[in-house]
Image (cartoon, rainbow, N blue to C red):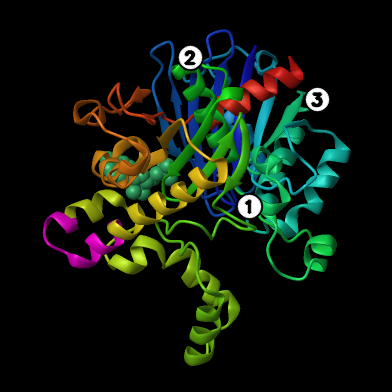
Amino acid sequence: MKILVINAGSSSLKYQLIDMETESVLAKGLCERIGIDGHLKHTPLIGGKPVFDEDLAMPTHSEAIAAVIDKLTSAEYGVVASMKEIDAVGHRVVHGGEKFASSVKIDDAVMAALEECIPFAPLHNPANITGIEACRKVMGDVPMVAVFDTAFHQTMPGKAYMYAIPYEYYQNDGIRRYGFHGTSHRYVSARCAELMGKPIEELKLISCHMGNGSSICAIDGGKCVDTSMGFTPLVGLPMGTRCGDLDSGVIQFIMNKYGIGIDEMLNILNKKSGVLGVSGVSSDFRDLDAAAAEGNDRAQLALDMFHYWVAKVAGSYVAAMNGVDAIIFTAGVGENSKSSRAAIAEYFGYLGVTIDPEANAKRGEDIMISTPDSKVKVFVIPTNEELVIARDTKAICG
Ligand code: AMP
């Protein structure tokens, strides 16, 4: 069975074609500048085929999907003979609200329910829906599945997902913590249980997804019991450019003092804050590490804040679960930055965590970076959201 995994943004579309016999990626690629001019980078990973990396007109997502199918099936760049070989499509959808606690086969009723979730993610869900519609148009009745970033977090208890504001806002409008990165937290926690050789039902895990966007998840017995992102992905940890937790009084103060409207304020909190805002250097942790090494105090402060927040939130989840068996680092920073991992692990001394510096220096593989006698184990597990989407699609359509 071959499954096409699609992650559609407003002007971009990422894809992977995965052979489920071996769970190997046959080809991957990225359409960019959809609706502007259009560019496709298509990388076949089998058969020694060349990379296609050129401008291509893409007025809408339909032309983008058509270009992807064309390349996947072409003699020069293709990895399958025809579209018939693509058995199903898995779509990443950011927000499933309270309607979707697991992945679902797409039909007209699901499309209508996805539309109803748009107010929760007005930037992301319309793009995801456009991607699904374009695929249905170009690929006809190939079965399709929606996999939600929020679904894994639907097991949170009310005490974790409710905000302490008038109950009517939850009841009437669905205002509550939803959480994001669920597909990633689900993948790494399941993989961690495999690596530990224990049933996930018997484990208390804390998963730290640290990338440009970052969130932490408390997973008790395989189920999410709390997570740091909320109604939107803006809160929790300070991130590349997002502010993380912030006293809402600060928003009122800045808006009043500088005569800023809510759209501009949210743009500042989403795009100009986080480690970029504090350091004034960059949102990229490689740049921050380099600047801090040259004595830039604000870059060091931004890094210190990030590490402190990861430790602080993870610590609160140890309390929430009354213990922890393993802590997992994943995503861009979690998988690549040994200095950030080491700095965060320093805070976990009270848990009896000890890190093996040699293991911590390795990259690109699932690895335990704590010493064998460490009371709580620490793992680096490269995330693979596409594989989860493909596996769910196979389970539902296969
Ligand atoms: P992601 O959102 O998971 O793709 O992560 C992207 C982020 O990972 C980048 O913005 C960097 O901050 C970070 N990153 C990637 N490689 C490294 C590295 N070698 N050292 C530190 N941070 C890294």
Q: Is mark 2 within 8 Å of ligand 1?
A: no
Residue 161 spot, x, y in % from top left? 68, 53
Q: Circle 3 is placed at which residue position?
A: 141
Residue 166 point in image, percent of width and height: 77, 71
Whole-angstrom CA distance, mark 2 to mark 3, is 40 Å
In magenta stretch: residue 126: no
Residue bearing the label numbered 2: 197
Question: Which of the 4 image quadrants contains residue 277?
Answer: bottom left
Magenta-drawn segment: 291-303
Relative placement, left or right, of 282 versus 216 is left
Q: In which image quadrant can residue 340 be found?
A: top left
For the residue marked with disc 1, what is the amino acid? His
Ligand 1 position by quadrant: top left
Q: Please state the horizontal and vertical placement of residue 368, each as a whole percent of the image.
A: 34, 24
Judge whether 288 appears above or below 265 on screen. above
Figure quadrant of residue 142:
top right
Q: Amino acid at mark 2?
A: Gly
Q: Which residue is mark 1?
A: 124
